[in-house]
Amino acid sequence: MFRLFAGSIKEVVNAVSKTPSQLAFEVPSSFQTSAACVAALSRPARELLDLLQQAGAEPFFVFDGAPLPAKSATEVARRQAREEAARMAAVAGSTARRLCGAVDITPEMAAACIEQFSPLGVKCIVAPCEADAQLAFLAHSGRVDAVVSEDVDLLAFGCPRVLFGLDVRRGCGQEVRLADIGKSRTLTPYRLTPETLPDLCVLSGCDYLPSLPRLGLRRAAQLLHRARGSVPRALQLAHRDGISVPEAYLREFIEARLVYTCQLVFDDDARRLRMLSPLPAFARNVRQLNACSFCLLGPISSTPS
């Protein structure tokens, strides 16, 4: 999987303000085919690049890096899905859609893309782990002004501005500002905030921790509302409501929560690896956490001080 961010979008998206800004893009997975960079530069991708360049943008691709330990169970399931897609493609005559779903993007394919992009003036970087966290770092640090994605996790990672549903041909999309998330009435009476959004994402089930039985988004929001935002209290209420809560769940919750705030990223100014954000105070005082807990965030050799 790879993501793209770019420069001036004055004429790219009608949904964003008309002032020049930096914009980060998530390239749809349909661009990721076994033909490596040839497919990545096929008509849909080239239309996107042309649109950006016509608007004065400077494309910059961010590739996924090493597998994230916290996501190992999800990756196993996705690998099985790719294998099934490959089997179905063989049975059904190798249709393009099934083939796209069957492909695992390898480091060699990423290297081929980077080699092909360079002559076009397209910059590339490989994230330490997930491109999502790297894009969030770029947004946090002011290197970009917005991120384009179909993945709402970018908001949970703390991206201030995300543009969903980019229509390349029309040059428009739907902008969501993290600061405005409290105005949402979708989960009333629960009031979302940028700080509590990751709690809701983890409690309702995410890539880093499966949800508890019978606990979806709306019920998770109700529990957090009743608990006044306290996750331990929400779990007590869930248990009282008949939901089975394993003994290790709170520790696993905190570990998954840290993935959204402290995943390993690359600071291109300092030329070093760092956490997306400093370790929050609540995590420093959780006795259940250990060095293995922090290893889930990426290749960190020891528990942060």
Image (tube, rainbow, N blue to C red):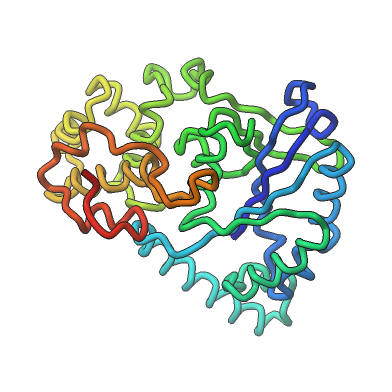
Whether 130 is drawn above or below 39: the answer is above
Front residue (pair 79, 107): 107
Front residue (pair 70, 275): 275
Whether 18 is drawn above or below 117: the answer is above
- Left or right side of 212 for 182: right
Q: Residue at horizontal 33%, vertical 34%?
A: 199
Kindly tell me whether residue 206 is visible in this rendering: no
Instruction: Say which quadrant the C terminus sits in.
Output: top left
| Rendered image quadrant of residue 200 | top left
Q: Residue at horizontal 66%, vertical 56%?
A: 124
Front residue (pair 290, 96): 290
Instruction: Say which quadrant the N terminus sits in.
Output: bottom right
| Rendered image quadrant of residue 101 | bottom right
- Left or right side of 271 for 71: left
Kindly tell me whether residue 11 is visible in this rendering: yes
- Measured as percent of width and height from the top left, residue 248 is found at 15, 51
Q: Residue at horizontal 58%, vertical 31%?
A: 142
Name of the residue lying farthest toward the front: 270
Name of the residue lying farthest toward the right: 54
- Measured as percent of width and height from the top left, residue 5 is found at 67, 44
Whether 72 is drawn above or below 109: the answer is above
- Left or right side of 213 for 123: right
Front residue (pair 19, 240): 19
- Left or right side of 152 for 289: left
| Rendered image quadrant of residue 112 | bottom right
- Measured as percent of width and height from the top left, residue 12 is found at 81, 34
